[in-house]
Image (tube, helix red, strand yellow):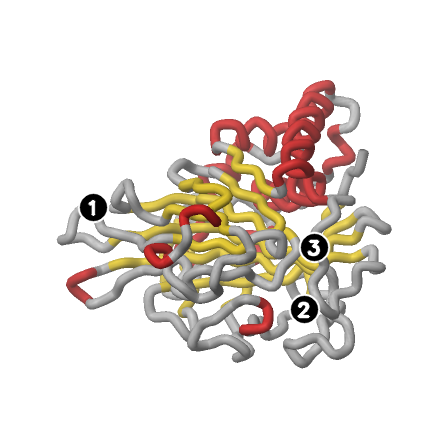
Amino acid sequence: MYTTNGHKVPPPPVPHVLNVLDRRYDARFYETISRIMSLREIYLRDRFIFVRGEDMIPILKGLGARQEDFKYIQLISDLTGPDPTLDFRTVTYGRYCIDFETRSIRRLEEQAYTLTVQEDYKRHDSGIPRMFDEAPTDMQGNTVVQALMIFKALIFQGVRVKPRDRLDYSSTSWICNMFDASTHTDKKSGIRGEPALEGVHSDGSDHTMTVFLGSSNMRPDSAVTYIHDNRETTGIQMCETNPTLIKGRVQHRHFLDSLLFADHDFKHSVTSLYQLDLSQPARRDMLILFTRRPKMDGHVQGYGDSMDLHSTASLHLPLWLP
């Protein structure tokens, strides 16, 4: 068994860097690109898409994800560590640069993560820089994770969104903050998992993608995501919202169910995680990718984005662009 952060999981596959350029001479690759471009058309029109896991799997394989990595990515959340401000969640976190000029994705050095009330994120830890356990190399070396990053880049490239204040929209680079977040509910221990304790909010991002990795003992009505018009009040709970301002409703239930939306074009909320069997804890594992332009001087968070590469967990992932 392989142990990290106090958890034991089976040995991971050997980390691998997916080279999507090697797929250029495979007809199935262009079938995959055609599917992605069809989804992109919907994203351009509606500003959000929900892709079922059964449809994501062939897309990720078409981009080069290895079969053995699909099983291991369902276990990767066992490697998460404590959240500094939430007792019902464990997390790992990595920063990446998506660069369309060099056509690459690169791992950036560790840096604090902050969201503010001014960015429509109203919670007890708003404005507080938070540090999380770093994403393990087993995660970024997983070709399913890499293919997800490539998929997202192909969807949002060139898509115009409502600009955020003090982000550099002239840059060719994007900052991608990737979280592996495991939410827990255990009534006996007084722990109630809230995938979005902050209620109606946005995440300071331009494009947000949420991917379901797995769950245990989760009640079927748990963790429903609602997409709200920006006129909705930041910080209120779902039960307080105006139904006429709801723009979409989705629920991640199956492996690799994925939601992608323009973060500043909407607000969103997620309902609580409930136990199916009250004698056992419930758990929900998600991969969350926040992607935005780099911060400019004067950004509300008070500090800029470090663009230095990670010194010990490097990644240089090639991009293919149509």
Q: Distance between the residues labelled 2 and 3?
A: 28 Å
Q: Which residue matches tag 3?
A: 162
Residue 271: image x %, image y %?
35, 53
Which residue is depicted at the point 38% across and 70% down? 86
**Whether label 2 touches label 1, CB < 8 Å:** no
Residue positioned 31% across, 58% down in the render: 184
**Image vertical order of residue 297 relative to residue 26, above or below:** below
- Name the residue that disc number 2 marks: 109
- Closer to us: mark 1 or mark 3? 3
- From the top left corner, tell me how far across and down residue 92 is, in percent: 50, 62
Report how many numbered discs are placed on residues in the image: 3
> What SS does tag 1 mark?
loop
Secondary element under disc 2, as helix, strand or loop, is loop
Cα separation, mark 2 vs mark 1, equals 40 Å
Q: Cβ–Cβ below 8 Å for labels 1 and 3?
A: no
Residue at the top extreme of this rendering:
27
Q: In the image, which disc is placed on residue 10?
A: none
**What residue lies at 54% left-to-right and 78% top-to-bottom?**
127
- Seen in the picture, residue 53 relative to 176 is either above or below; the reply is above
State whether residue 33 appears in this view: yes
Q: What residue type is labelled 1?
A: Leu
**Residue 243 in the figure: left or right of residue 277:** right
Residue in the image at 53% along x and 74% along y: 131
Q: In which quarter of the image is residue 181?
A: bottom left
Q: Nearer the viewer, residue 72 or 203?
A: 203
Mark before the other along the chain sequence, 2 or 3: 2
Q: Which sits in the foreground, 195 or 4?
A: 195
- Residue type at mark 3: give it: Lys
- Tag shown at residue 276: 1
Q: Position of residue 195 (x, y in %)?
A: 39, 57
**Image spot of residue 244 (x, y percent):** 45, 46
